[in-house]
Image (cartoon, grey):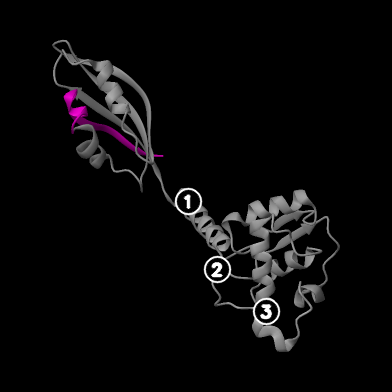
């Protein structure tokens, strides 16, 4: 399905394009393609450095055009609110800086030059954003029902639950709970939790968090009652 952009020469349109490129190196796919050329050609001038992601992308596509061109076909893009883009414009898009001559090309584009601190920071932020986005898509979730048993009928169950909920791990979310009588005046805590499978192991949670000091002052043992993929 084609990607659609609106009024990319306006501040609002550029902001949306900038947000779109936050976690992407190209308009579509994992290589420069015809889609990049269409959007590049639709921009009436180089974007302001205020739009960090668009500027980074624009300069990269411009550099590719100077050196080797772009051969990827893309998956389709529509730019609304701009002048119609001809096949000639896509085939030979305008280069932002036309002052340099062919003899100066080596000085204009230094692919092996050192990155500025701003460029390094922007690259790190993009990588982190892509990693987080990928993890969200790939990581499954599970719903777990846990039995938490006290030492005896004198254990303060309110403090026991507070101790259990004090455990904070990335990918772990505590849910509803209730006390269930087990006999001889003893009650156990049944508590729901949701986990991100790639981040949290329930067995490790029990062995290394819920049954060690200081929580084991209240908790004798924990058992998994139900484990369901979400």
* Position above or below: 4 against 196: below
Give residue 194's position: percent from left, percent from top: 38, 35
Position of residue 186 in the picture relative to residue 24 (left or right): left
Query: Which one is in front in this view, the residue at disc 2 or the one at disc 1?
Result: 2
Disc tally is 3
Give residue 109's position: percent from left, percent from top: 64, 78
Quadrant of the snapshot with the N terminus = bottom right
Magenta range is: 212-230
Residue in view at x 56 percent, y 65 percent: 116
Position of residue 149 in the picture relative to residue 25 (left or right): left
Tell me which corner region of the image, top left, top right, bottom left or bottom right, holds residue 201.
Answer: top left
- Which mark is first along the chain, 3 or 2? 3
Q: CA distance from mark 2 to mark 1?
A: 24 Å
Which label is found at residue 115?
Answer: 2
Which label is found at residue 132?
Answer: 1
Is residue 215 something one can see in this rendering?
A: yes
Q: Which residue is mark 3?
A: 108
Quadrant of the snapshot with the C terminus = top left
Q: Residues within 10 Å of mark 1 (few under 14, many from 20)?
A: few
Position of residue 203 in the picture relative to residue 123 (left or right): left
Q: Residues within 10 Å of mark 2 (few under 14, many from 20)?
A: few
- Which mark is first along the chain, 3 or 1? 3
* Position above or below: 174 against 121: above
Position of residue 141 in the picture relative to residue 86 (left or right): left
Residue in view at x 76 percent, y 48 percent: 12
């Amino acid at each position: 399905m084609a990607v659609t952009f609106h009024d990319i020469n306006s501040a609002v349109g550029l902001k949306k394009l900038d947000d779109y490129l936050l976690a992407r190196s190209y308009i579509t796919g994992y290589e420069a393609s015809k889609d990049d050329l269409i959007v590049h050609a639709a921009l009436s001038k180089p974007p302001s450095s205020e739009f960090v992601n668009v500027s980074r992308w624009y300069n990269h596509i411009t550099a590719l055009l100077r050196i080797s061109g772009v051969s990827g076909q893309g998956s389709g893009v529509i730019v609304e609110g701009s002048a119609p883009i001809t096949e000639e414009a896509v085939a030979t898009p305008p280069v932002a800086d036309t002052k340099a001559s062919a003899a100066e090309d080596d000085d204009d584009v230094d692919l092996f030059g050192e990155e500025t601190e701003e460029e390094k920071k922007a690259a790190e932020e993009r990588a982190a954003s892509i990693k987080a986005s990928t993890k969200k898509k790939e990581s499954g979730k599970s719903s777990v029902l846990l039995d938490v048993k006290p030492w005896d009928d004198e254990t303060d169950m309110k403090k026991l639950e507070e101790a259990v909920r004090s455990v904070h791990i990335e990918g772990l979310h505590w849910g509803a709970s209730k006390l269930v009588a087990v006999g001889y005046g003893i009650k156990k805590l049944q508590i729901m939790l949701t986990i991100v499978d790639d981040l949290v192991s329930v067995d490790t949670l029990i062995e290394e968090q819920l049954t060690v000091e200081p929580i084991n002052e209240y908790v004798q043992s924990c058992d998994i009652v139900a484990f369901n993929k979400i």
